[in-house]
Amino acid sequence: MTDYVELDVRPILTAGGEPFGCIMETVASLKPGEGLRLLAPFRPVPLFGALGSKGFTHQDREIGGGDWEVLFTPTAGPAASPAEAVGDRWPTPLMHLDNRGLMPPEPMVKVLGAVEAMQVGEVMEALLDREPTFLFPQLTQRGHEWQGGFDPDGTVYRLQVRIGTGS
């Protein structure tokens, strides 16, 4: 049974504020096994991926008046490519890209270009403003492994790519 910490972001949004930082602080403060019960004036679809990459599943329902309740429940861990073995240790990244501040699809283009210049087994790290959901299938299709997630403050997505066989 999961215990949920409740966060109502409706007052923040009504006051014209941005609740993302508060949401990520709350998530970072959760104890092992705790989940987040989020109340919002709309269905917060962008959070599904953001918290999914931090190891949470979600269940959402409209609770009336256009308001939504979303239960974010912890799962096994952060997002990773299907090929990643559990407990597998990754080497230190040899290449670092800071793709923050770029407009899509430029971050994806830069990552794909960089991995082409690397050798099998090498690892690169990219800093991004958002979860690169469209990049993941491209990396997998090219035979590369990846893992990533948002930093605790929720402002930077750190992606690591281990260069594969290119199959």
Image (spheres, grey):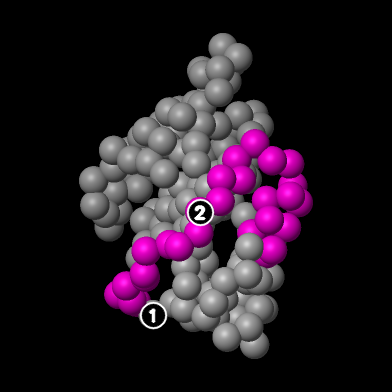
Tell me the quarter of the picture where residue 43 sits.
top right
Magenta includes 87?
Answer: yes
The type of residue carrying mark 2 is His
Residue 152, x across and y down, in percent: 38, 41
The type of residue carrying mark 1 is Ala
Q: Is residue 60 above or below residue 89?
A: above
Q: Residue at x 55, y 32 (%)?
A: 40
Q: Residue at x 33, y 76 (%)?
A: 88
Q: Which residue is mark 2?
A: 96
Q: Which residues are magenta?
A: 86-113
Q: Is residue 23 above or below residue 86?
A: above
Of the pair 132 and 14, the residue shown nearer to us: 132
Q: From where the camera sits, is residue 137 visible?
A: no
- The N terminus: image quadrant: bottom left
Residues under labels 1 and 2: Cα distance?
23 Å
Label 1 element class = loop
In the displayed orientation, state which residue is furthest to the left.
Answer: 31
On residue 85, which mark appears?
1
